[in-house]
Amino acid sequence: MLKLTARQQQILGLIQSAIENTGFPPTRAEIAAELGFRSINAAEEHLQALARKGAITITPGTSRGIRLCNASLQVADAQMTLPHASLQQLSLPLVGRVAAGSPILAQEHIETTYQVDPGLFSQKPDYLLKVRGMSMRDAGILDGDLLAVKKTDRVRNGQIIVARLGDDVTVKRLNKTSSRVELLPENPDFDVIVVEEGRDDFALEGLAVGLLRTWG
């Protein structure tokens, strides 16, 4: 069992809660704001300490590049055992490019199928989507990543969603108002996509519930 300080346990619990609620870890700024730190440097120091103890891994250069390690962790005085790889695996289809106007899970879009540990995700996903581009870079979602998606149209503001817009399928953070939908990138080099009410070529395809990264 990892030996963590009370503050480290608190931060680890915050990370776990964010992943359970949104599918993604918090930013350093969000951790600092939640815990009353005066700067994000304090949050970074605690994250680095958690990484040295093997509780998390950190992907450099991304604001949400925090991953929980597969280990038994003592959090808030409660034993929480993350799922072991030997548990029953999920069979998830990997969706590549999606043809305009056709269902996202149409057979011609399926590149392959992955067997994955269901404990990796905040909710049970229905498919994996290959990410294209860097518009969600600062959420830790990079070109070539495999986004785990739960097929649903029940989503909340602030969640990362998969949407169909015209001929494109895109991954963005949702902000919905009474008159329009805004699809927010997590990279300042990309513009917000505004979907006005009544647009008939827009559809929610699902909710992001986790991420897989392939190397090489």
Image: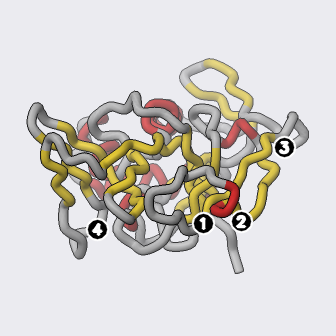
Residue 168 or residue 125, whichever sits in front: 168
Closest to the camera, between mark 3 and mark 4, is 4
Q: Residue at x 28, y 60 (%)?
A: 185
Three-letter amino acid code at disc 4? Answer: Asn
Q: Are marks 2 and 4 in contact (CB under 8 Å)?
A: no
Q: CA distance from mark 3 to mark 4?
A: 33 Å
Closest to the camera, between mark 2 and mark 3, is 2
Q: CA distance from mark 2 to mark 4?
A: 28 Å
Assign the C terminus to one quadrant of the image.
bottom right
Residue 194 or residue 131, whichever sits in front: 194
Disc 2 target residue: 111
**As drawn, is 202 to the left or to the right of 211?**
left
Three-letter amino acid code at disc 2? Answer: Glu
Residue 46 or residue 70, whichever sits in front: 70
Q: Are marks 3 and 4 in contact (CB under 8 Å)?
A: no
- The image shows residue 134, relative to residue 24, as above or below, that is below
Q: CA distance from mark 1 to mark 3?
A: 26 Å
Please tell me how many numbered marks the rendered image carries: 4
Q: Residue 96's mark?
A: 1
Q: CA distance from mark 1 to mark 2?
A: 6 Å
Disc 3 target residue: 85
